Amino acid sequence: MSSVEDKEVWPEIVLRILKANDVSLIAYVPDNVLSPLIRLLHADPYFTVVVPSREEEVIGIVAGAYMGGRRGIALMQTSGFATIANALASLACPFQIPVVMMISERGTLGEFQQGQAMVCRTMRPVLQSLGIEHFAIQETAHVEFVVDKMIRQAFSTQAPAAVILSPLLTKRPH
Amino acid sequence: MSKTEDKTGRDGVKVMNRSALTRRLVARLNAEEAVVAGIGNTNFDLWASGQRPQNFYMLGTMGLATSIALGVSLAQPDRKIFALDGDGSILMQLGSLGTVATTAPKNLAVIIWDNGLYQITGSQKTLTSSSVDLVAMAKAAGIAQGEWARDEEHFDALVDKALNGDGPWFIGVRIDGEKAAGTTERDPVKIRLNFMQGLGVGT
């Protein structure tokens, strides 16, 4: 890896990989950890960015866009993921719609709010029980490979997928 | 104007029939318009009106018809998109009205069939049967072009406006509690593939 690429931080890598995979629609409910990525996406005219009021809407918008021929991604926090089990189980999964999610993981590795810690524990059981492919990225060096392959697999197999951003990636000094 | 004198609010308009109006809507479509129909009687009546390939029938995710239709509209800005949903459904996602207003898709119209009932679960009352006016809510959310359909002819006129002018549009329709005219075939992947082919999207 060149010295220029070494300086690229995770939000910049994600933006580059989204473009490389023709993912041009962004729908999100804000999160502090995601905010550097959100700023970059808003600043880049390649992306259409929609900011609904609930994560369920986000899933509906990304699913609808896919059926219309446009690739999108849903950005949310762990607690937001906890509100979309029904949307995944009755829309994305049975209709086989590749809703790609990027979830910033809160509630572990230094959480200070008990509710956040508890809701975080529901995320993987829900993903597993729905059979949704998921992977938690812990290293900057893994961002490009994991995001790219997760997106490619989702669209190749018509299946939703969850890219989890671990605090090891987003909070730990690299 | 007092509430009793207002002939354009929810209390002042004619109570019509969803099956009949769904057929009226479909009859006015040119061919290529997409229609996304929410769960239960809304998509049963769309199914019964003829299985256009540009129709999408939801089998769950109550409340998300407008959001799914918004996604389609962002993918295909040159195609007109209609979202059909019930009052009980849209009450679950009132924030989506603000999302539509802020995103401002010119090609999207939302039609809400409002009978004040959770009809499919035993006709329990929804909030619109007491205090909620969904057209007023849509307008307050920022969808300026929102109206109650006063009667069948006015419904036709509102649909024509949505077909020929820039949206987004919100059309509220008072309906009765009659059963739907059919039942949708429940095969999710088949529904999606037919819809995508209808929209000219290769999978």
Image (spheres, coloured by chain):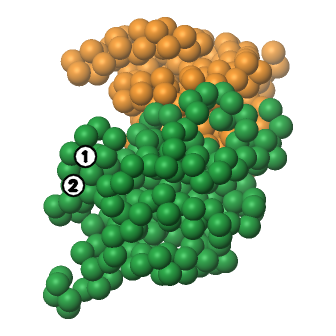
Chain colours: A orange, B green
Q: Position of residue A105 (x, y in %)?
A: 44, 20
Which residue is nearer to you in this view: A162 or A84?
A84
Quadrant of res B146: bottom left
Which residue is nearer to you in this view: B52 or B75?
B52
Amino acid type at mark 1: Ser
Considering the numbered disc 2 on the image, is that residue within a helix, a strand or a loop?
A: helix
Q: Chain of mark 1?
A: B
Amino acid type at mark 2: Leu
Q: Is residue B12 above or below residue B185?
A: below
Residue B202 visible in the picture = yes
Q: Position of residue A35 (x, y in %)?
A: 49, 38
Question: In the image, which disc is placed on residue B53?
Answer: none
Residue A53 visible in the picture = no
How far is mark 2 from mark 1, CA to CA?
Answer: 12 Å
**Left or right relative to A135: residue B179:** left
Q: Is residue A139 above or below residue B160?
A: above
Considering the numbered disc 1 on the image, is that residue within a helix, a strand or a loop?
A: loop
Q: Is residue B191 above or below residue A82?
A: below
| CB atoms of marks 2 and 1 within 8 Å | no
Residue where numbered disc 1 is placed: B123
Image quarter hosting the C terminus of chain A: top right
Which residue is nearer to you in this view: A51 or A155?
A155
Residue where numbered disc 2 is placed: B127
Image quarter hosting the N terminus of chain A: top right
Disc tally is 2
**Left or right relative to A139: residue A19:** right
**Left or right relative to B76: residue A93:** left
Q: Position of residue B27 (x, y in %)?
A: 65, 66
